[in-house]
Image: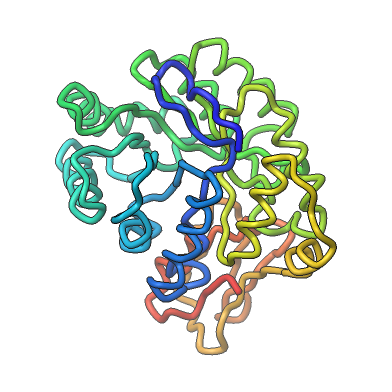
């Protein structure tokens, strides 16, 4: 496994980052012991970087996986908090749940422009004070938008940017794949540490997985790429690709045949909360029930978190 410095933070991360969204309740909803075993397999293979968020509800999985692990584990988390008090609660919850004295990276979750960053500045000020106290090592944003990357690049207080990038441009807001690549270049010129997300387009690119991963591995300014993994086979596959190791035909077949889709149960009553939550514009109401435009769905599972009847899931 190759390791690269994350900007100017002094943090060195594996090229493959374990994306923890997939194992948790918004997606696969694995039992904690099973999800922790998948993470542990990645650690044993040389992955030292885990990406999560308060919203994902996967801290318990991560703690179970790392609690007796002897090596270094870099953890990045995120929060939607926009006030000082809200961010304080988010960070303290992460510290408690992970049984840690500090979190390596703490990000503002889904910031899409300079305007949204300004609207969260009180939370940024709290993270700056937490960084001074050693409670976090680096701060920044995650974003799906070209403008979000460009705006964050020009914020001197930010260390890290976590953008959405994939070969098909699936889920990129405010521009094309080429626009996002140019924005990533700009951010690197400002000295930001950058690690990517949604390399497989939320699962849409699984049939072209090797091509999709080769694309992101060819982006020079990405120190790491977060990839969601929910099985040991997926870990083994991704570790092999990221390490340049040969892949067996059996492993290619096991991973390549997996498909994911957003499923809405028949008992949906059309409250519309998920439609409001969907940043991709993939959900809409027809005759009192939610429908999905699968061509636009990122398979993030965020809509499921706001469903009061638990009728939305990624399967």
- Report if residue 125 is visible in the image: yes
Q: Which residue lies furthest to the top in this view?
A: 189
Asked whether 233 or 214 is in front, the reply is 233
Q: Residue furthest front?
A: 70
- Give the mark count: 0
What residue is drawn where x is 77% and y is 43%?
A: 168
Q: In the drawing, does residue 213 fall left or right of residue 24?
A: right
Asked whether 33 or 176 is in front, the reply is 33
Q: Residue furthest bottom?
A: 267
Q: In the drawing, does residue 35 fall left or right of residue 63?
A: right
Position of residue 287 relative to residue 253, above or below, is below
Asked whether 52 or 101 is in front, the reply is 101
Whole-percent x and y of residue 124?
27, 29
Q: Residue furthest right?
A: 249
Q: Quadrant of residue 213?
A: top right
Q: Quadrant of residue 211?
A: top right
Q: In the drawing, does residue 125 fall left or right of residue 166?
A: left
Q: In the drawing, does residue 296 fall left or right of residue 125?
A: right
- Looking at the rendering, in which quadrant would you find the C terminus? bottom right
What residue is drawn where x is 56% and y is 40%?
A: 144
- The color scheme shown is rainbow
What residue is drawn where x is 41% and y is 76%?
A: 31
What residue is drawn where x is 47% and y is 55%?
A: 20
- Looking at the rendering, in which quadrant would you find the N terminus? top right
Whole-percent x and y of residue 271?
44, 75
Whole-percent x and y of residue 230?
56, 65
- Report if residue 273 is visible in the image: no
Whole-percent x and y of residue 224?
57, 34
């Amino acid at each position: 496994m190759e390791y690269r410095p994350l900007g100017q933070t002094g943090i060195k991360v594996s090229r493959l980052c374990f994306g923890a969204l997939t194992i948790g309740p918004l997606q696969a909803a694995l039992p904690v012991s099973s999800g922790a075993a998948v993470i542990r397999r990645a650690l044993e293979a040389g992955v030292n970087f885990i990406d999560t968020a308060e919203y994902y509800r996967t801290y318990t999985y991560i703690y179970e996986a790392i609690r007796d692990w002897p090596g270094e584990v870099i953890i990045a988390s995120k929060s939607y908090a926009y006030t000082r008090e809200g961010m304080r609660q988010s960070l303290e919850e992460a510290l408690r749940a992970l049984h840690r004295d500090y979190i390596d990276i703490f990000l503002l979750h889904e910031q899409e422009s300079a305007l949204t960053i300004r609207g969260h500045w009180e939370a940024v000020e709290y993270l700056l004070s937490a960084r001074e106290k050693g409670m976090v090592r680096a701060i920044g944003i995650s974003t799906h938008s070209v403008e979000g990357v460009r705006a964050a690049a020009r914020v001197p207080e930010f260390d890290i940017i976590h953008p959405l990038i994939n070969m098909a441009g699936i889920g990129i807001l405010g521009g094309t794949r080429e626009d996002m690549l140019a924005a990533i270049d700009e951010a690197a010129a400002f000295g930001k540490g950058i690690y990517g997300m949604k390399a497989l387009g939320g699962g849409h690119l699984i049939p072209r997985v090797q091509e999709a991963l080769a694309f992101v591995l060819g982006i020079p300014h990405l120190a790491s790429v977060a990839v969601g993994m929910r099985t040991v086979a997926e870990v083994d596959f991704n570790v092999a690709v990221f390490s340049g190791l040969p892949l067996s035909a059996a492993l290619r077949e096991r991973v390549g045949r997996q498909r994911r889709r957003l499923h809405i149960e028949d008992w949906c009553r059309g409250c519309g909360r998920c439609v409001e939550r969907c940043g991709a514009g993939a959900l809409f109401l027809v005759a009192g029930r939610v429908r999905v435009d699968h061509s636009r769905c990122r398979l993030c599972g965020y809509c499921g978190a706001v469903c009061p009847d638990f009728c939305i899931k990624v399967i």
